[in-house]
Amino acid sequence: MPTPAQELIAKLPKAELHVHLEGTLEPELSFALAQRNGVALDYDTPEALVAAYDFHDLPSFLAIYYSAMRVLLTEQDFYELSYAYLKKAREQNVLYCEPFFDPQAHTSRGVSFETVITGIRLAQKQAAAELGIESQLILCFLRDMSAESAMEALEQSLPYKDWIVGVGLDSDEKGNPPSKFAEVFKRARAEGYRLTMHCDVNQENTLGHIRQCLDEIGVDRIDHGINSLEDPAICADIVQRGLGLTVCPVSNRFVVQDLTATHIRRMLELGMRATINSDDPAYFRAYVNENLLALHEEGGLSLDEITQLVRNAFVVAWIDDAQRARYLAMLDHQLAAA
């Protein structure tokens, strides 16, 4: 029998703003695609693959994450990957999402940009029509590759500008500050894209990186951003600018052994627009509802705090005011009925 908290979280209309499509590759789909595409895997069963998910920091996660992408080769593969995520998200009452995708991780393997984005786009359109979940893509550059490679990916995206709402920056942060990609993001802004960047938890020179995001890049959002709490001036800037922070608590528990619930509560107390997201749910074994429930049951956040986190996601989503008002009205209606 579900608890009242489980029932409420399940019923709340939600938006998800920090989820990597490649990170939604469930083991069963991975094995099916490997068999179809003739790709040899290092494990004999999906269960053995899950048992190997022994992450203790960002690099240890990324090693498995990039290796798993080898099975993604065709437009159909990217369609199936994306539709499976959108279906799962809709089952958790996610009405809107802004998934990331990593084109360089595929073009570097000989898979064309067109193949990747066409497959994803087909899934988006079908999910909107059949499931009622709207989505907009965010192209993420891999920060451990060169700025020149990022610029090439940006240029490859331009024929598909209508399919992409913004650009981001992910992968291994060590030695790869935001400033490395300043020209790429300046060009992306000029092309009309919104801007976000990962500032992963407890990374080297993390406060310097967050400050670069704010002052050199001029981001519209920050992904993760937990360490901003270490600098009151940074927190004040984020609040003053109304920036969203896309926090991923279960991911944090894997990568830094901390659900960061106290940090998330502190963000709310300071008026920061924190949101809750699943990051790479196939690997961390938790989609958005499980993240929210963990914050309530394990982290001690109240249901009012959970509701504020859900509301924040609609507030900072890259949608127009009419769409935002519609989603917030749906949220208010559900809360009134609870």
Image: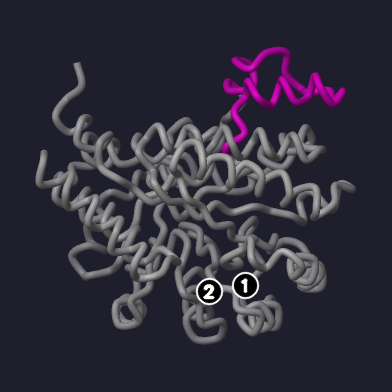
Residue 69 horizontal/vertical position (percent): 73, 38
Q: Report the disc number at residue 209.
A: 2
Name of the residue lying farthest toward the right:
110
Q: How many marks?
A: 2
**Which quadrant is the C terminus positioned in?**
top left
**Closer-to-camera residue (251/136):** 136
Query: Where residue 169 sits: x, y (%)?
Result: 61, 64
In the rendered image, the vertical position of residue 206 relative to residue 201, given as above or below: below
Q: Residue at x 14, y 29 (%)?
A: 4
Q: Main secondary structure of the magenta part?
A: helix
Q: Residues within 10 Å of mark 2 (few under 14, many from 20)?
A: many
**Callout 1–callout 2 Cβ contact below 8 Å:** yes
Q: Residue at x 49, y 86 (%)?
A: 215
How far is disc 1 from disc 2 in space, using C-alphas? 6 Å
Residue drawn at point x = 54 percent, y = 73 percent = 194
User: Residue 49 in magenta?
Assistant: yes
Q: Is 243 or 55 nearer to us in this picture?
A: 243
Q: Which residues are magenta?
A: 24-51
Question: Can you identify the residue that label 1 sits on?
Answer: 177
Q: Secondary structure at mark 1?
A: loop
Q: Is residue 204 above or below residue 303?
A: below
Q: x, y percentage for residue 135?
A: 51, 52
Is residue 174 positioned above or below 234 on the image?
above
